[in-house]
Image (cartoon, helix red, strand yellow):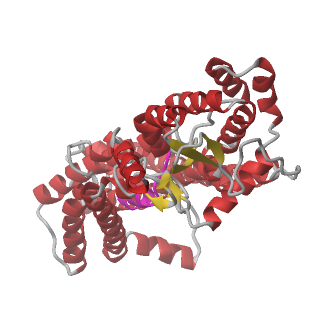
Amino acid sequence: MSTTKQTKPNANQRTALREQRERQAAAQRRLSRIVRTTWIAGITAIAVLIGVMVWAVAGNRSATPAPSSGAVVAPANATDTGALRFGTGPVTVSVYADFMCPFCGRFERANGDYLQQAVAAGSITLDVYPLSFLDQQSGGSRYSTRAANALVTVANADPVTALKFNKLLYSNQPAEGGSGLTNAQLADFATQAGASADVAASISREIYTPWVEQATQQAFASGVKQTPTVQINGTEFTGDLYTAGALQAAVEKAASGAK
Amino acid sequence: MPSSGTLAAVRRLRQSNGWIFTTMLISALISLTASFVLSVDAVVLAADPQAALSCNINAVLSCGTVATSWQASLFGFPNAFLGLVAEPVVITIAVASLGGVRFPRWFMLAAQVVYTLGVVFAYWLFFQAYFVIGALCPWCLLVTLSTTLVFASLTHVNVRDGILLLPERVSRTARALIAHDLDAVLVGVWLTVVTAMVVVKYVPLML
């Protein structure tokens, strides 16, 4: 009798024990509900994200603008190496640049004024190679190609305006990886540089896109590997591209050597 | 979750020290390698600023804009140096733990605090590169991913062993959730989100 008293709990203790067991069971159920919900939500989220990735990649593949198949129209004052030629000075300075390339912007901001003056003064012949290889870094908007086409369009009509336009585009350069300027914005800058309304309006027709593509291929085939690349009389300038004065000194040295 | 034999075995394995510290070790080695490459780049860049200040035709993701941004050396020296300092400590912890060493609580707690700061910094950099600089570098991404895995494994083991100074109730719940592999779900979703962000924004640009 006494043993049963010890092992068998009385009514109160039984209730307490049952309540405790029920609390534990409820907690256990809650936990397994949380676990199940999280697993399902997690796997669903991963599946949805994978779907989004596939959709983004596959959808964009079909939306990628086809490379232009139009006929190559060479602008006035183009060289057969794929450059726009400015001026007739004794020293030839070649500049390979892409409008999306941040360091081309730095080069242009350091040396643009000097190059413009030297062309005007007749001391250099400036060959500008507007490349389009950074197209992939403007969110699918092909900024490099469109900006190069804009420059060529303006240069075809008026070289002096084109150099001003070139400078404007680099001083208002959009960030690498962004979507760049629109054709309308490019036309606005062209007008601001002094291009006629007709010329500015024809930028959006992208007449020179095939020429730009061809010129870019030509430049890389000739051994250019990066932008900006600057050559003086065909020899690569390896000095400081980003401080005003260094290029000028090298050009002047080449000029005195030629005399 | 109901589990068949293999699933149960996999889940048991995932809770074992061998698995946790091996994950930590491999992730830390990847992170150290990436930090080393980035550090070498930074030194080359410092010695010859002209070297990387251009857009190479082979540049897939960026023109060196990430490496030359102010964010890339927030503390006045290249961020990658921090990886060179921190990852060998993690590697030591992982190797010693695999060998059976158990560190004192204060030691693991300090490791958790420092590495939490590290992972916050890694994601700050990721978001800066993604939203502000607008360019990604592959090695930086590798650091982001491996840092996440090291953090996850370190937190896993510290929660499991009750190292963290959590209130008893929170600690018990956290242990229960980890025992049901919810940390794996969370890390899986998190890494997929990061991957999706990169894929959606950058892969179409490379096609």
Which residue is pictured at 25% across the width and 72% down the height? Answer: B94
The answer to whether residue B30 shows anywhere in this view is yes
Asked if A4 appears above or below A42 in the picture, the reply is below
Residue B121 position (above or below residue B34): above
Q: Residue at x 25, y 45 (%)?
A: B168
Residue at (49% x, 75% y) in the render: B10
Q: Is residue A107 above or below residue A92?
A: above
Total number of numbered labels?
0
Is B67 left or right of A64, judged from the image as shown?
left
Name the image quarter holding residue B91: bottom left
| Residue B155 point in image, percent of width and height | 31, 56
* Between B9 and A92, the one nearer to me in the picture: A92
Stretch of the chain drawn in magenta: B135-147
Is B140 a magenta residue? yes
Residue A88, image quadrant: top right
Q: Is residue A54 visible?
A: no
Q: Residue furthest bottom?
A: B99
> Magenta region, mostly helix, strand or loop?
helix
Q: Residue B154: percent from the left, percent from the top?
A: 29, 60
Left or right: A145, with A227 as reference point? right
The residue depicted at 71 percent of the width and 39 percent of the height is A152
Q: Residue furthest front?
A: A259
Q: Which quarter of the image is occupied by the N terminus of chain A?
A: bottom left
Does the magenta run of residues contain A61? no
| Residue nearest the viewer, comparing A77 with B147 | A77
Q: Position of residue B55 (x, y in %)?
A: 50, 53
Q: Is residue A136 rendered to the left or right of residue B186?
A: right
Measured from the top left, where is residue B105 in percent x and y?
Answer: 13, 58
